[in-house]
Amino acid sequence: MALTRGRRAVVILITVIVAVVGLAGGAVAWHVATASLYSAAYNTETSSARRLVTALDDRTSAVAQGKSTVVGAQTFLGRARPAYVPVAAFTALKQKSDALHTTVAAVRPVKAPADRSFVPNVATVALPWDTLITTYQLVDRQKANVAAVHAATHDTAVVNAALDDVLTANTAVWGDIRATANTTLAGDTLATYQSQIGLKHALAAVADSTTNPQFVGRGMLATITAIETVRASQAAGEAAKADPAYPIHAEIEAYARSISHGVHLDFVWAHTVNGKGDGWLSGTTQAWSEDGGWAIISLNFNVADYWSDGQDARALVAHEVGHSQAIRVACRPLYSGPVFDSNDEMWATAWSISMGFDVPGSGIEAYGRPTDQQIATAAKCR
């Protein structure tokens, strides 16, 4: 069949249009395919970058703990070994601490995730070949991130293993220190309550912390120092027995404790207390409600000299014990209420009088006589 010139032109035009449409369809398909590859690469690289940040944080934390543990251990290992810590346990801790130091020092920085600001959104990439180039870059970055994650994770594992070795060695040493501390508390009965509190606090601070890197060395050293403090106080108590005045001091202290209603009392004896020495009966009291309630009572030597000479010395001791009673739960409202309004000296004087010491030494001479209402109120604290 023959075609006219016009018909041939139409056929050619249709053919061109089909070809163009085919090329356009191929370009669209190419763009869609490259965009899909880019999106997958982008998500994978983003995920690996996040894992690297986490791995680097874990590594930083492990290295920091390792360094802190080494420094802490040295506070203990740098001093003379206590006799109650076996040589083998002490040596093992030193070896493990040195190994941890070497391990931490060998850790080298791991490259952090690269700057991602260059990565464009796929929708802004106009040409498929540009999308492919960026996709290849993301794939390379993802591989680098994965390698860095492996390196950081390895470093963290090595440091943590060395740290665990130190903690294990530390636990063995701590067992001997803790046993000695408990024996000291049970046996050194002449030590002051204040020194015993220090040791109890040291033990309490590490009761659940032997696996904490911050405890290594520092916690043990604090406990050792507290043990030495109790032992020194015990030695002072033993030495005091050689003082000719010890029997009367012990009698006075026993009397004070007998009326303290459970408040723990420490005593300090001196020639001059609160500026008063020869010719005076003088005492002071410091009291704390914490740690079971306790106080330090200071008395000058004249209190012992005049203990059996009338009631004034006994009245003064009762006055000082009275100060300590204000911290008791049952007595605190009486002391701080409207009758006394936390007047320390009037409270202690009234309490001494309520104990039967209506004499100058109760505090009357120094602070005046309390009212009958105050005496009756203080008497409720008995």
Image (tube, rainbow, N blue to C red):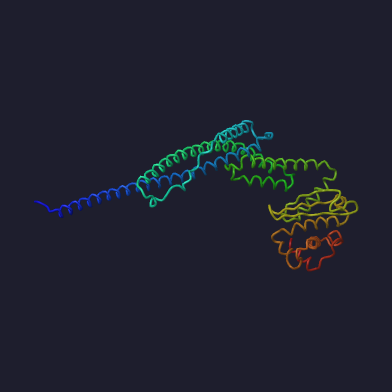
Q: Quadrant of the C terminus?
A: bottom right
In the rendered view, tell whether residue 3 sits above or below residue 225: below
Give residue 221's position: percent from left, percent from top. Answer: 66, 40
Q: Quadrant of residue 86?
A: top right
Name the side, left or right, on which 326 lies relative to 56: right
Determine the residue located farthest toward the front in the rendered image: 5
Name the side, left or right, on which 197 lies relative to 63: right
Name the side, left or right, on which 223 lies relative to 305: left
Q: Number of marks in the image?
A: 0
The residue shown at (45%, 47%) is 118
Give residue 374's position: percent from left, percent from top. Answer: 78, 66
Q: Quadrant of residue 89?
A: top right
In the rendered view, tell whether residue 147 sits above or below residue 379: above
Q: Front-most of 213 and 286? A: 213
Determine the residue located farthest toward the right in the rendered image: 279
Name the side, left or right, on which 166 lies relative to 274: left
Q: Front-most of 17 and 295? A: 17
Give residue 14's position: percent from left, percent from top. Answer: 20, 53
Q: Front-most of 258 and 161? A: 161
Determine the residue located farthest toward the left in the rendered image: 1
Give residue 233's position: percent from left, percent from top. Answer: 75, 43
The residue shown at (76%, 51%) is 296
The residue shown at (80%, 58%) is 319
